[in-house]
Image (cartoon, helix red, strand yellow):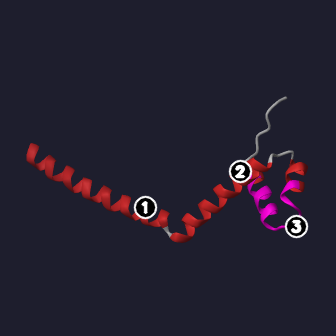
Amino acid sequence: MKRRTWSADEKLAIVLAGLRNQQSIAELCREQKLSQTQYYKWRDQFLSGGLKGLTGVNGETEHHQRRQIERLERIIGKQTIIIQ
């Protein structure tokens, strides 16, 4: 049997349908021909990503990366002057 693949949009729709509690997870998974284990993996990934967005982890990481780049550019500038 050919293995089915889902797009990110399809996964999102399935996870949101499960979170709405309009039907049981078992019914939803049967309807979508999806194992409950796979549904819960997707749900956990979705919730983990949402938590990161709400805590600002990504924003702090980007800020830290920009500061690191600026610091390294200054070091490169100083090394360039020393070499010349």
Q: Are marks 2 and 1 in contact (CB under 8 Å)?
A: no
Q: Is residue 84 visible?
A: no
Q: Is residue 3 magenta?
A: no
In percent of the image, x 64 and y 55: which residue is there?
45
Label drawn at residue 15: none
Q: Mark 2 highlights which residue? A: 8
User: CA–CA distance between discs 3 and 2?
Assistant: 21 Å
Q: Main secondary structure of the magenta part?
A: helix
Q: Mark 1 highlights which residue? A: 61
Which is nearer the N-term, disc 3 or disc 2? 2
Q: Mark 3 highlights which residue? A: 22
Quarter of the image holding residue 33? top right
Quarter of the image holding residue 43? bottom right
Residue toward you, 22 or 69: 22
- Residue 27 in the figure: left or right of residue 35: right
Q: Is residue 30 visible?
A: yes
Task: Determine crowd level at label 3: few under 14, some 14-19, many 20+ residues with C-alpha closer than 10 A.
Answer: few
